[in-house]
Image (tube, helix red, strand yellow):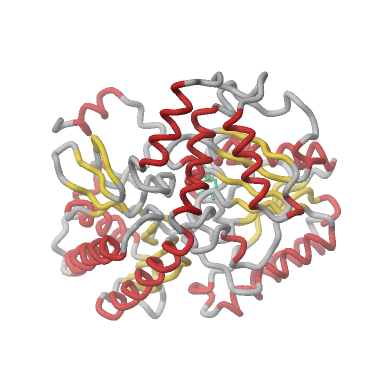
Amino acid sequence: MNGLYDRESRSVSSLAHLRFFPQAVTGGKGAMLRGDDGRELLDFAASWGAASLGHGHPAIVEAVNRALTDQAGASYLSTANEPCVRLAEKLLSIVPERAAGRVWFGHSGSDANETVARAVIAATGRQRIISFKGAYHGGTVGSVAISGHPAQSGIDKAAGLSLVAYPDSYAAGSPEAAAQAALADLEERFATSVPPEEVAAFFIEPIQSDGGLLVPPPRYFKEIEALCRRHGILLVCDEVKVGLARTGRLHAFEHIGIEPDIVVFGKGLGGGLPVSAAVGPEAIMNHASAFSFQTLHGNPVCAAAGLAVLETIERENLVANAAKVGDIMLGALSDLARKHPLIGNVRGQGLAIGVELVSDRTTRAPAGDETALAVYRAFQLGLVLYYVGVNSNVLEFTPPLTLSENEAMRGIAILDQALGDVEAGRISPQLLERFAGW
Ligand SMILES: *Cc1c(COP(=O)(O)O)cnc(C)c1O
């Protein structure tokens, strides 16, 4: 099926494209994808973490087939269906008690965050929301409105939105300095332009993924939690990319030691099918009916896939696998840093890993072009990974949670070669002409 990429460019709109190289695939199994040219590609992106169990996992195949064979409708708007109820019950059983009220189901992280943003304002009567500079909470009008990622600059923000600094330990020189600067920014806002008693919710990412895979300083979010409690601000934890086993804990918020009021799940929850969930107190999640829905929300086929993902995470010990293989990868990437001057910083938790590329280790100047070339070269060599970051210079690793140690080391060997080729100037920048990235 050679030529799929070019056929796509003649038939499919580019409005949703976020392209780094001419990837076109016709199938996949586990952590491997098959290119339309027959090449085997090792997938360290897993479609931005959505293919959490890898490709074609038997548990998802079985659950989806079963749900379709005796299909309980296509929606939960006007009828209860069993996969939805079972998934809701399961989600309520895994979140902290303060969040374990009711579950809303959607298709995407975007619609879930948008719904939560609308619901917290409607239910509390408070008009303000706080989120972070660099945060990505989605691509719909209402989720862009509460996001701070520069790729979305120029799109309107919510009237009551305040964006505060996320702590960046590498840029600040140390975790302590980063935490101090970020907290000072927030406290200054509270004292001046953002009266805390007007704030409905604080949207956080326990690792700021699209902003650059930023791992927060150890106690930073404990302080945020305390401030939120003092002022009656709801703490909304966006676990869309890094939740559900990815960080080597079931929830990424376990690493930062907080208990959110509302938890948002997406991407990996469906294991490749579109399903998201917002889980929070009854007073918020039952604020009104007919408040936020799309016809296929609560689709039993997608809900069945979500349930299969959660059950497989438990049955196959994928929390432990993510912790173990993630540690091995972090170690191997730190070794690569000794050999490649492009690598400024390696960070992450479990199988959520970022490698920040710089053109100068002293100034930490971002190496954006080299980052784009490195992922392109890795693709040529058989490895799929993308990049993130407000300066477009952080390689992002979100492989399937089922990744083996052997696959991890194979991928890192490819990256080693790709970085060497870029550093030696062997890769032509012209390759990037059609690939804007972000
Ligand atoms: C991807 C992402 C979203 C949006 O999810 P979609 O499924 O693309 O709508 C929201 N929050 C975070 C943290 C994400 O990484």
**What percent of the width, then of the height, locates residue 279?**
68, 44
Residue 356: x percent and y percent? Answer: 39, 67
Q: Residue 152: horizontal and vertical position, in percent?
A: 51, 44
Q: Is residue 156 visible?
A: no
Tell me if residue 68 comes above or below residue 200 in the rendering: above
Q: Is residue 173 left or right of residue 195?
A: left
Q: Is residue 209 left or right of residue 161?
A: left
Q: Is residue 3 left or right of residue 238?
A: left
Residue in view at x 53 percent, y 53 percent: 244
Q: Which residue: 60% across, 51% down?
A: 238
- Closer to the camera, 214 or 45? 45
Asked if 168 appears above or below 38 in the picture, the reply is below
Q: Foreground: 257 or 83?
A: 83
Q: Quadrant of residue 64?
A: top left
Q: Quadrant of the N terminus?
A: top left
Residue 424 seen in this snapshot: yes
